[in-house]
Image: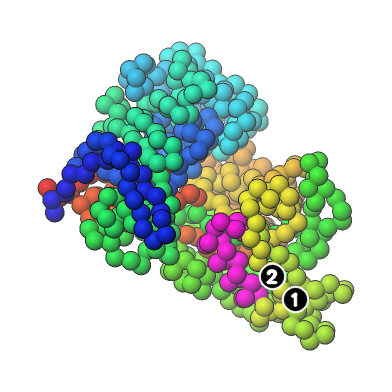
Amino acid sequence: MKRKAHYLKHFTIALLGSAFIMGSMETVYADKESIILAIGGENPEGYDPILGWGSYGNPLFQSTLLKRDADLKIVPDLAVDWSLSEDSLIWTVKIRADVAFSDGSPLTAEDVAFTFNTAASAGGLLDLSNLQKAEAPDDETIIFTLKTPDITFMQHFISLGIVPEKLYGPGYARNPIGSGPYKFVRWDEGQQMIVEANDRYYGDKAKIKKLVFLFSEENAALAAARAGEVDVLGIPSSFANQDIAGMKLHVVKSVDNRGLMFPLVPNTGKKTPDGLAIGNDVTSDPAIRKAVNYAINRQALVDGVLDGYGRPAYGVVDDMPWDNNKIRFHDNDPAKAIEILEKAGWVDANGDGIVEKNGRDAEFVILYNSKDILRQGLALTVSEMLKRVGIKAIPQGESWDRIKKELTHLHVVVYGFGDHSPLEMYKLYHTSGPEPLYWNAGFYSNPVVDGYLDQALLAKTFEDSIPYWQKAQWDGETGFAVSGDAAWAWLVNLDHTYFINKCLDVGQSQMEPHGHGWPITANINQWQWTCN
């Protein structure tokens, strides 16, 4: 198949009813060395790793010390050697000597130390609070000193892109310079971003020399793809069962999950230091949480809400190396759910279809982001499923701002997580501080689980930590999974769906983390055209 040349100038697509218009065009040659992507994900704060860019997925412009391959194994990137001291407090990392930033300036250990020290004090999305200091005794060595042992600290070696100390400043996020496979060229906010292959990149050189990222709404991006103006299109699963001329569907398995977070303490009038009310007198009963888990038909959620693109979720780390497959259970079992409720004293005494206990109905609100159709669909469908066991769940859409700042500790919330690190498990299930926000928003606490999670951090190697992550889920007697405390009702793991130009080979995609779109670029320097 021969590819036509397209020319773009400030490529803008505006949705007008069911139609779209294209703005004026500047030359961006889209031949076999250039592709156009509409994968969403414009980052309004810019592209600064210190503020969290690239923490889910690939930072693209910047290199990291380590990375994960297609099988999620940890492999070198900038680093050539790394080791942990006997007391697990000091990481020593050696980096390549042949690395330059895209502007030609050398990347040294000083840049790495600066990046980590700055990120630790920046208060961004990355939590490097356990880093005491990073030092560079020479150009190729970095010494990271931790405050307490934490084997998961090495995840930051994978996710934190390195920035140049001499060029870093207030404007960096909107003009990023790094040593990754691509270099930033231009960003027309709300419209497009143009990047080019970095000729100074030390790794495998990108075969696709220019990328144009379009930022438009889903319907507008789909219309552009139908017009032949897009090569890679990220779409929700509800759009996947379509035919687009010249494109093929690319489905990527993910650990991007959705689940119901339960408030786990009663509502006693207690508030957080910031004044947020805490607790729910219904969901604090483990019988309610267990019954919800057994009553839900997860495969029906996959088939109906996800249009078949996904798989049932039973935990936050399904199919990851630290997953405990002993937490799997037979869901869609309303009889078992009713049995659990009856044994705990929840019965329908007045015949209204809702079970009650001590004069209190089994009723709670399920909050979801009102702009998220998928979460809305999950909340509505789960609500219907719970009716058959006598639980009244009321779906309610709210803004993320109101959910997180006012309601998150009072009501069940449809949240989404999913990372390539078990550290997320620690944040969700370890006894929290007084103001956890969306991390452990339900105030879950189990000292046995805390012990396993703490032991995992203290492990001498990452492999040694895996049994502790698994025991925290379920050790045969207790854990945070359904067989134990049933702290969550995990619902589904999404498949990430894309339409790809039939002449574009994107290789083997990683199982992607939370966040549809940018993670697909993790192996972008391997992409290539297969048609002449």
Q: Secondary structure at mark 2?
A: strand
- Labels 2, 1: front one: 2
**Dot 2 surroundings within 10 Å: few (below 14), some, or many (20 or more)?**
many
Residue stretch rendered in magenta on the structure: 368-386
Q: Residue at x 18, y 44 (%)?
A: 5
**Dot 1 surroundings within 10 Å: few (below 14), some, or many (20 or more)?**
many
> Which residue does the numbered mark 1 point to in the structure image?
341
Quarter of the picture containing the N terminus is bottom left
> Which residue does the numbered mark 2 point to in the structure image?
393
- The three-letter amino acid code for the residue at tag 1 is Leu
The answer to whether residue 481 of the structure is visible from this angle is no
Nearer to us in this view, 215 or 21:
21
Residue 519 colored in magenta in the image: no
The answer to whether residue 515 of the structure is visible from this angle is yes
- Rendering coords of residue 224 (x, y %): 32, 53
Is residue 215 left or right of 528 when viewed as pictured?
right
Is residue 293 left or right of 298 when viewed as pictured?
right
Q: Main secondary structure of the magenta part?
A: helix
Instruction: Indicate the quadrant where residue 526 lies.
Output: top left
The answer to whether residue 209 is above or below residue 245 is above
Nearer to us in this view, 38 or 261:
38
Nearer to us in this view, 227 or 461:
227
Q: Secondary structure at mark 1?
A: helix
- Rendering coords of residue 109 (x, y %): 45, 18
